[in-house]
Amino acid sequence: MKKYLSSMILILALFNLAPIFQQQVYAQNEITVNYNGKQLEFDAKPYVKQGKTLVPFRKILEAFGAEISWDKEEQIITAKKNTTEIYLRIGIQYGYVNGSKVSLDVPPEISGGRTFVPLRFISENLGAEVKWNGLNKTASIEYVNHTYKLGQEGTYKGLKFKIDKLDTTSESGVLMITGKVSSGNKDMVLEVADDYGYVLPAEIDIKGQSGEMDHWQAKVYLPGCHNFIGKYLVLKKPNVENKLIKIGQYEL
């Protein structure tokens, strides 16, 4: 009889604990998204599909401070942030970034009445770095949004840089840009962008060294058929995964 009562008590205890276990398992399966160290709260839960994390599009783009539009009839998402303009269409395996066609591992989709987009695609094409912790299912987005004036020194994780001068008088149709960067950073990339997402690459040439800084000069060739008016100088650098991450921008 005592053995029977002990078994019944154990069974009842397990029934009472079951909801707690279910909550713990559910919590462990939830995906957390952090933006510059702050957790984002979504109105629909992110999920993983084909190894890629999808999140509600409006919240993630608002975190970046992007301008957003949604064409319900055509099911097209448009997002613009400074020098970058992104077009995505529901169910389509590619998008457009500043007019260039870019393939997607997973297309945007509608689930439960919410529109979801691939987190890494959005973040990296806006110049952010994304790190994934599989143990606690956490995606961490690091995004630099510092805008400097010409002559100001910027920093990114210990790296120093400065754009000193922009000269349009040296050669017709060419922008000459001079600046400095911490020595050894020869993989730095410079782009000039206008207000419409049109981006021009710069050719960087290291001219010499002064202390811990390299002096460089860059040329940007302006297209003769395009009424280009540069507004931003954007500095980028490859991360450990060899993906370009924005480290700062200068406003012209």
Image (tube, rainbow, N blue to C red):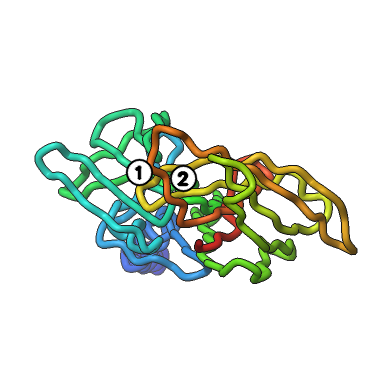
Marked residue nearer the N-terminal end (2 or 1): 1
- Count of marks, rendered view: 2
Percent x, y of residue 216 = 75, 51
The residues bearing labels 2 and 1 have C-alpha atoms spaced at a distance of 8 Å
Q: Disc 1 on helix, strand or loop?
A: strand
Badges 2 and 1: C-beta atoms under 8 Å apart? yes
Q: Which numbered circle lies on residue 122?
A: none
Q: Nearer the viewer, residue 93 or 203?
A: 203
Residue 99 visible in image = yes
Mark 2 — residue? Answer: 125
Q: Nearer the viewer, residue 58 or 172?
A: 172
Which residue appears at 58% of the width and 60% of the height?
A: 248
Q: Disc 2 on helix, strand or loop?
A: helix
Can you name the residue that lies furthest to the right here?
A: 211
Mark 1 crowdedness (10 Å alpha carbons): few <14, some 14-19, many ≥20: many
Which residue appears at 56% of the width and 41% of the height?
A: 172
Q: Which numbered circle lies on residue 86?
A: 1
Q: Nearer the viewer, residue 229 or 128?
A: 229
Q: Choose top left, top right, bottom left or bottom right for residue 23.
A: bottom left
Percent x, y of residue 224 = 45, 34
Which residue appears at 75% of the width and 59% of the height?
A: 180
